[in-house]
Amino acid sequence: MENNQQHELEKLANTKMPYGKFKGRYLIDLPEHYLVWYRNKGFPKGKLGEMLGLVYEIQLNGLEDLVRKLKDNN
């Protein structure tokens, strides 16, 4: 995997939702129904929206466990 892509996936694995009902939960651990709701409503603009869209696609394809393995062990 290209170094930049791995860095982006590591960042995704370690980013938490900054607001709302699921504030503080890792993006990769957001419930599917919440991501589907955002997909239908429209993801927010900017980096967070891009990351939520990527998590949606990752979960849609059943790949979230691969991203979870990239979480920091803090």
Image (cartoon, rainbow, N blue to C red):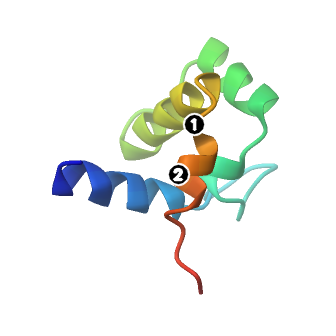
Helix, strand or loop for disc 2? helix
Residue neighbourhood size for the residue with mark 2, other residues' Cα within 10 Å, grouped as few (<14), some (14–19), many (≥20): some
Q: Does 3 sit above or below residue 43?
A: below
Q: Residue 7: where, in percent of width, then height?
A: 29, 60
Give the quarter of the figure containing the C terminus: bottom right
Quarter of the view holding residue 62: top right
Q: Are marks 1 and 2 in contact (CB under 8 Å)?
A: yes
Quarter of the view holding residue 16: bottom right
Q: Residue 8: where, in percent of width, then height?
A: 32, 53
Q: Residue at x 77, y 52 (%)?
A: 22
Residue that sits furthest to the top in the current view: 40
Q: Residue at x 73, y 58 (%)?
A: 23
Q: Which mark is residue 63?
A: 1
Measure the alpha-carbon separation of dots 1 and 2.
Answer: 7 Å
Q: Which residue is mark 2?
A: 67
Q: Residue at x 70, y 65 (%)?
A: 24
Q: Is residue 44 toward the left or the right of residue 28 in the image?
A: left
